């Protein structure tokens, strides 16, 4: 039987809502605790359960502490489990963000219970939230059309009679998440103006800016897929800055999307800084695994992807992408049979899935496994099948598949076919604003050179104890200097950033197991590269142990592990400064920066004296500083390549 609510508790709830809306998170949580104590004192079990659920949501959304959130959600569930059917059971069932519920089967079950209570007791706010979470669960299970219709109905209710802003903000988050994973970008755009009209999206602190950041993340992701990377970067960086101006907590939706873009751009240090501490969020798991793979840490990439697969259960959309990455990682480790097992599961989850982007990714994974198994003809056919399934509206994915075909034809020894596919890739790229990884760009250039040369090519080659520099029939021989070797390291990998200390280590041949150059002569990085690798591994191990403890009901152990994990994450975060650069305690990096910059600029000047046009391109495109890079553009009149042997490695 319903009881009259405690007036003091209701006032505390109002104060909590007001505090959350202006970004005063701790104040809001304190007020929820006050309300919980008062409801408990008067024996109001149902309202106590709802407050416990809201505390769980606060820990999940604002603090990012899944361990504490699960404890509070579990307490809320226990309080109403034996109560007669009531609305509070529905609110407890779908407490928190639907997109943070790991398993779509569980989310569907919870949403079904909430929808039943909402319609039986006439609560339109609960009905809208239940429709949103149920729709997201359907999308994740591969029932995209049905799921998106439920989400449309939920959004229509929030643009009409439903007015619970807290529930609406969480439900709209489920909508944007569904659009993100199913690539329903047009659908998201369709509702944005209405959501702004009713005040759910905006720049005010609290739920408005939170949803605005999520909307921007979806928009940025769409632009990334469309190959409009500068626009995507502007929107994501602006949204991230706006969120962190308004709220005392880190943004995660635009930060994670921006990290994904940084990985594609090869700016791995920036990506890692953006992802530090966010690897507990499901949305971050795929970019985290991609980052580890890009950094060459196959085992850590597999650990992150495996944790993600465990968390999402039978989720087909997220499962396809995570498993496709597992395939790549296993192949990178030359474990073809393990890759084949993962590929079989990819194909099983993608079967009948009406999401062309994901079907293409599944086919691409299968093609890679076929090629690794020696069946190049079938691999090429499968990659072509993947390409045929991708609409022209996803040009970045089409380029990725064209590149796959170039590589497969190269393996098959069919240079003519590889040249044709390279030309098709370049044709698509001509209309895009994207940066290819150095290896992909080199592959395209290799097959395009013989048929469609652009501009003039300059060659930097190590010939014994001297360097040969040639362009347009003019050749110059220069004595081997550190500056030329630094230059060659950058030119051989266009677009890839190198820390000055890493350049010094490569050129001077410092042993990997020798003294840590990053610590010689100063207090060293707050965490050097080796320490960061160790910390990443420990954080991933702790995340897995936390999930084990929560699954086994060992809440206290989970809390202890969470505290240890937070300490490691804090130290990782402290190791990064502006834009993901490692913060240093003193002067070794600065000395290296000065020496590398001076010697490289001297080398460029020597080249320019003999080959003015080629030297001018180097002068414009070599970026120096703590992080150095060679950043050519397609408009450059001279294209630079390196042909040398550095530290026992052949380079072209």
Image (cartoon, rainbow, N blue to C red):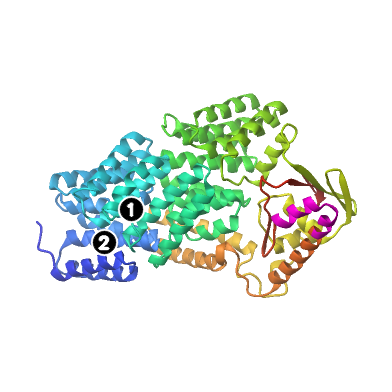
Quadrant position of residue 583: bottom right
The correct choice, above or below, for 114 with respect to 23 in the image is: above
Number of numbered tags placed on the structure image: 2
Q: Does residue 537 appear in this view?
A: no
* x, y percent for residue 41: 17, 70
- Which mark is drawn over residue 52? 2
Which image quadrant: the N terminus?
bottom left
Q: Does residue 198 appear in this view?
A: yes
* x, y percent for residue 200: 29, 54
Nearest to the eye among marks 2 and 1: give it: 1
Quadrant position of residue 28: bottom left
- Magenta residues span 605-621
Q: Quick check: is 490 in the magenta stretch? A: no
Mark 1: few, some, or many residues within 10 Å (few <14, many ≥20)? Answer: some
What is the C-alpha distance between the residues marked 2 and 1?
15 Å
Of residues 578 and 332, the one nearer the viewer is 578
Tell me which residue sits at (47%, 38%) in the image: 320
- Which mark is drawn over residue 97? 1
Mark 2: few, some, or many residues within 10 Å (few <14, many ≥20)? Answer: many
The correct choice, above or below, for 285 with respect to 346 in the image is: below
Q: Quick check: is 620 in the magenta stretch? A: yes
Secondary structure that dominates the magenta span: helix
Of residues 322 and 213, the one nearer the viewer is 213
Tell me which residue sits at (67%, 44%) in the image: 439
* x, y percent for residue 11: 18, 69
Tell me which residue sits at (60%, 49%) in the image: 294
Q: Is residue 177 left or right of residue 644?
A: left
């Amino acid at each position: 039987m319903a009881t009259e609510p405690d007036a003091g508790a209701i006032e505390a709830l109002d104060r909590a809502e007001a505090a959350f809306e202006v970004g005063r998170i701790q104040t809001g949580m304190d007020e929820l605790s006050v309300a919980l104590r008062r409801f408990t004192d008067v024996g109001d079990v149902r309202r106590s359960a709802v407050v416990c659920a809201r505390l769980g949501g606060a820990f999940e959304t604002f603090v990012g502490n899944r361990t504490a959130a699960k404890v509070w959600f579990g307490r809320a569930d226990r309080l109403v489990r034996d109560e007669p059917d009531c609305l509070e059971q529905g609110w407890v069932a779908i407490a928190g963000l639907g997109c943070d519920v790991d398993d779509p089967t569980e989310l569907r079950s919870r949403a079904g219970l909430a929808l039943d209570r909402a319609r039986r007791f006439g609560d339109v706010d609960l009905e809208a939230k239940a429709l949103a979470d149920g729709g997201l669960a359907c999308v994740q299970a591969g029932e995209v059309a049905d799921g998106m219709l439920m989400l449309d109905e939920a959004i229509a209710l929030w643009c009409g009679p439903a007015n619970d802003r807290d529930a609406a903000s969480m439900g709209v988050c489920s909508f944007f998440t569904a659009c993100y994973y199913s690539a329903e970008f047009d659908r998201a755009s369709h509702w944005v103006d209405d959501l702004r009209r009713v005040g759910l999206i905006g720049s005010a602190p609290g739920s408005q800016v939170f949803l605005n950041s999520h909307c921007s993340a979806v928009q940025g992701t769409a632009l990334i897929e469309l190959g409009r990377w500068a626009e995507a970067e502007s929107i994501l960086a602006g949204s991230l800055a706006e969120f962190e101006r308004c709220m005392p907590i880190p943004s995660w939706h635009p930060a994670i999307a921006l990290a994904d873009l940084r990985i594609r751009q090869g700016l791995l240090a920036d990506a890692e800084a953006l992802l530090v501490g966010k690897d507990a969020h499901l949305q971050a798991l795929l970019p985290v695994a991609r980052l580890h793979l890009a950094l060459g840490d196959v085992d850590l990439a597999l650990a992150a992807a495996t944790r993600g697969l465990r968390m999402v259960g039978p989720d087909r959309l997220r499962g396809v992408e995570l498993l496709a990455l597992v395939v790549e990682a296993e192949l990178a480790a030359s474990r073809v049979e393990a890759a084949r097992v993962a590929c079989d599961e990819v194909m099983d989850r993608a079967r009948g899935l009406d999401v062309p982007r994901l079907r293409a990714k599944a086919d691409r994974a299968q093609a890679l496994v076929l090629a690794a198994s020696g069946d190049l003809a079938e691999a090429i056919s499968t990659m072509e099948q993947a390409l045929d399934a991708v609409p022209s509206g996803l040009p970045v994915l089409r380029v990725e598949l064209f590149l796959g075909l170039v590589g497969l034809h190269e393996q098959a020894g069919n240079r003519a076919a590889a040249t044709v596919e390279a030309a098709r890739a370049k044709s698509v790229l001509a209309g895009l604003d994207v940066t290819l990884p150095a290896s992909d760009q080199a592959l395209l250039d290799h097959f395009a050179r013989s048929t469609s040369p652009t501009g003039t090519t300059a060659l930097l080659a190590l010939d014994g104890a001297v360097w040969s520099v040639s362009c347009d029939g003019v050749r110059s021989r220069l004595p081997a200097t550190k500056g030329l070797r630094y230059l060659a390291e950058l030119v051989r990998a266009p677009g890839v950033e190198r820390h000055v200390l890493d350049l010094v280590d490569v050129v001077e041949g410092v042993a990997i197991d020798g003294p840590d150059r990053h610590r010689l002569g100063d207090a060293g990085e707050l965490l050097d590269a080796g320490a960061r690798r160790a910390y990443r591994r420990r954080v991933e191990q702790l995340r897995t142990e936390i999930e084990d403890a929560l699954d086994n009901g060992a809440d206290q152990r989970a809390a202890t592990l969470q505290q240890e994990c937070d300490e490691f994450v804090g130290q990782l975060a402290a190791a990064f400064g502006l834009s993901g650069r490692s913060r240093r305690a003193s002067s070794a990096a600065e000395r290296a920066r000065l020496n590398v910059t001076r010697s490289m600029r001297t080398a460029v000047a020597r080249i320019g004296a003999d080959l003015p046009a080629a030297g001018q391109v180097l002068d414009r495109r070599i970026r120096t500083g703590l992080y150095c890079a060679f950043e050519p553009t397609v408009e450059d009149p001279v294209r630079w390549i390196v042909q040398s042997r550095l530290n026992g490695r052949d380079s072209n």
